[in-house]
Image: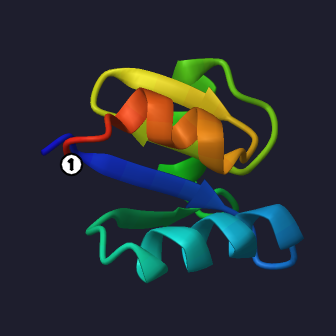
C-alpha cells in the first residue's frame, strides 16, 4: 500500500472533498495543514504553491480529482 499525505488548508473546499473521499474509502493518510510550519516547508520542497496536494508514495498530485487519484494510487489498493 502506498503511503498517503494530504496537504490542506482550513477553508479549502477541494481539500475537504479530498479528505472526505479518502475517508469514504477507508484509506489511512497523514493530514498536514499547509499553514503550519511543517506543512509549509514540505510543500515548498515539492514546489507546490496551492492546496490540496496529495503525496502518493513518491508521486505528487496537485489539486483534487478522484479519477486521477485512483489512477495514481492503483486499483489494487
| Percent position of residue 77, x then y | 21, 48
Q: Nearer the viewer, residue 53 or 1?
A: 1
Residue farthest toward the left in the current orientation of the protein: 1
The residue identified by callout 1 is: 77
In the displayed structure image, the side of residue 15 where residue 75 appears, left or right: left
Residue found at the far front of this picture: 75
Q: Does residue 41 show up?
A: no
Residue 70 higher or lower than 37, as above or below: above
Could you say where residue 15 lies in the image, as x and y percent from the top left?
Answer: 72, 65
Residue 76's quadrant in the figure? top left
Where does residue 68 sit, x and y in percent of width and height? 61, 33
Image quadrant where one finds the N terminus: top left
| Residue drawn 32% across the image and 64% down it | 29
Q: Nearer the viewer, residue 2 or 8?
A: 2
For the point 63% across and 50% down, the residue is 66
- Horizontal placement of 17 versus 70: left or right? right
> Picture coordinates of residue 17 (x, y %)?
72, 71
Q: Quadrant of residue 62?
A: top right
What secondary structure is found at the residue carrying circle 1? loop
Residue at 63% x, 64% y is 18
Amino acid at each position: 500500500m502506498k503511503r498517503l499525505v494530504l496537504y490542506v488548508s482550513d477553508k479549502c473546499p477541494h481539500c475537504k472533498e479530498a479528505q472526505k473521499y479518502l475517508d469514504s474509502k477507508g484509506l489511512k493518510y497523514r493530514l498536514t495543514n499547509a499553514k503550519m510550519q511543517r506543512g509549509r516547508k514540505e510543500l515548498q520542497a515539492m514546489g507546490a504553491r496551492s492546496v490540496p496536494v496529495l503525496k502518493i508514495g513518491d508521486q505528487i498530485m496537485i489539486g483534487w480529482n478522484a479519477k486521477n487519484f485512483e489512477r495514481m494510487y492503483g486499483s489494487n489498493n
